[in-house]
C-alpha cells in the first residue's frame, strides 16, 4: 500500500509518497519537470514488496507547498537543501537515488555533498554531460541562461510549460501513444494553473543554467566514489537524448546501460521493464 503523507520542514509543507518495508533498501525517487511524485505511482506499486520507496514533491510541485518566489528563491541549490533536510527529518541514513530530468541536478547535489549516504544511482533521462544538451533542443534555454529577457522568457514558456508542451513531454518518442494515459499532463495543467506556478517553473528553467558548470564536479564524484549505477534511458527522448546516456560509461565503466524504445517519461510506457531492471540490479 502506498501512503500519501505530508511533513512540515520549518514551516514548509512537503508532500511525499511512501511504501514498502523501512528495513529494506530505500529508493529515494526524485521526479522531473514539470512533474511530481505522481510519475512514480506505478513503479512504487511494482517495487513495494522489495524496497522501501520514498517519493517527495519538490516545493512548488505536485501537492507540496509553493512558497512565494521572492521569499523562497527557486533554485536547484534550494531544492537540494530541502530534499536533504527531508531525508534527515525522516532519518533515512542511506538510499539509492532514482533521478529523472530535474531529479538529476537535485540528486547529484545530494550525492556530492554526502557520498557516504548514497548506495547507488538509478539514472533515467537525467543529464550530467555537455553531450546531453544539444542545441537542436536546448538553444532557447541557453539563450535564456545568457539573457533573461522578456522575449526569451516568453519563448521558454511556450516551448516548455504551455498546455501543448505538457502533453508533448509525455507522448513524443513513444511506441504507442494510445498506451499513454493523459492523467499526468492533465494533473500538471491543473497544478500549473495555480497563481504563480508557471513563474516558479520559469525560475527553475532559468536556474538550470547553473548545472552545466557543475558537471565536472559530478563526473569527479563518479570517478572517485564509483557508485553502482543503473542507467535506464528512453532513447527516443529529444529533451535528454541518448547522447547524454553513453558518456556515463566513460567515468563509470561498470555502469549498466539499458536504452529503451520510448520517450522522456519512460516509466509511462516501460515501467514494468524498468522495475525488472531495478530489481535485478539493486538486488544483485
Image (cartoon, rainbow, N blue to C red):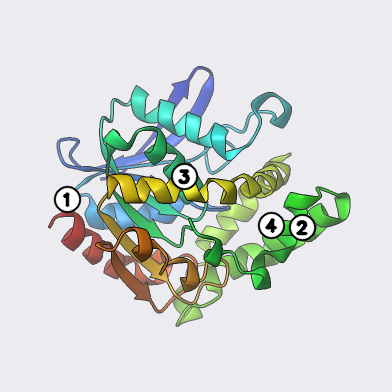
On the rendered structure, is 46 left or right of 192? left
Quadrant housing residue 200: top right
Q: CA distance from mark 3 to mark 4?
A: 30 Å
Residue assigned mark 2:
143
Mark 3 neighbour class, 10 Å CA radius: few under 14, some 14 to 19, many 20 or more: some
On the rendered structure, is 95 left or right of 193? left
Q: Nearer the viewer, mark 3 or mark 1?
A: 3
Image quarter where the N terminus lies is: top left
Residue at image coords 63%, 51%: 190
Q: In the drawing, what numbered circle is on residue 161?
A: 4
Residue at image coords 49%, 30%: 81
Q: In the drawing, what numbered circle is on residue 49?
A: 1
Q: Residue furthest top?
A: 10
**Judging from the image, what secondary structure is the residue with disc 4 in?**
loop
**Judging from the image, what secondary structure is the residue with disc 3 in?**
helix
Q: CA distance from mark 3 to mark 1?
A: 35 Å
Residue at image coords 77%, 58%: 143
Mark 2 neighbour class, 10 Å CA radius: few under 14, some 14 to 19, many 20 or more: some
Q: Sequence order check: which comes first, mark 4 or mark 1?
A: 1
Q: Sequence order check: which comes first, mark 3 or mark 1?
A: 1
Residue assigned mark 3:
217
Q: CA distance from mark 2 to mark 4?
A: 17 Å
Q: Sequence order check: which comes first, mark 1 or mark 2?
A: 1
Answer whether labels 3 and 1 touch (C-beta < 8 Å): no
Q: Nearer the viewer, mark 4 or mark 1?
A: 4
Q: CA distance from mark 2 to mark 3?
A: 24 Å
On the rendered structure, is 60 left or right of 30? right
Amino acid at each position: 500500500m502506498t501512503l500519501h503523507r505530508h511533513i512540515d520542514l520549518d514551516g514548509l509543507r512537503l508532500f511525499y509518497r511512501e511504501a514498502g518495508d523501512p528495513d529494506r533498501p530505500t529508493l529515494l525517487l526524485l521526479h522531473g519537470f514539470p512533474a511530481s511524485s505522481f510519475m512514480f505511482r506505478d513503479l512504487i506499486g511494482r517495487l513495494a514488496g522489495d524496497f522501501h520507496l520514498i517519493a517527495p514533491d519538490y516545493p512548488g510541485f505536485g501537492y507540496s507547498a509553493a512558497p512565494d518566489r521572492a521569499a523562497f528563491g527557486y533554485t536547484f541549490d534550494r531544492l537540494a537543501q530541502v530534499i536533504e533536510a527531508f531525508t534527515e527529518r525522516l532519518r533515512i541514513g542511506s538510499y539509492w537515488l532514482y533521478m529523472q530530468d530535474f531529479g538529476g541536478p537535485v540528486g547529484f547535489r545530494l550525492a556530492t555533498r554526502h557520498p557516504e549516504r548514497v548506495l547507488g544511482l538509478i539514472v533515467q533521462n537525467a543529464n550530467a554531460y555537455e553531450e546531453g544538451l544539444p542545441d537542436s533542443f536546448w538553444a532557447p534555454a541557453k539563450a535564456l541562461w545568457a539573457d533573461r529577457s522578456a522575449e526569451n522568457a516568453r519563448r521558454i514558456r511556450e516551448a516548455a510549460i504551455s498546455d501543448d508542451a505538457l502533453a508533448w513531454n509525455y507522448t513524443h518518442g513513444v511506441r504507442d501513444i494510445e498506451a499513454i494515459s493523459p492523467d499526468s499532463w492533465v494533473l500538471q495543467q491543473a497544478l500549473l494553473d495555480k497563481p504563480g506556478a508557471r513563474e516558479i517553473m520559469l525560475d527553475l528553467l532559468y536556474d538550470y543554467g547553473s548545472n552545466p558548470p557543475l558537471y565536472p564536479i559530478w563526473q569527479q564524484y563518479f570517478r572517485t566514489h564509483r557508485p553502482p549505477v543503473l542507467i535506464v534511458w528512453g532513447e527516443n527522448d529529444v529533451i535528454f537524448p541518448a547522447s547524454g546516456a553513453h558518456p556515463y560509461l566513460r567515468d563509470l565503466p561498470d555502469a549498466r546501460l539499458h536504452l529503451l524504445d520510448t520517450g522522456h517519461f519512460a516509466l509511462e510506457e516501460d515501467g514494468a521493464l524498468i522495475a525488472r531492471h531495478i530489481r535485478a540490479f539493486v538486488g544483485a
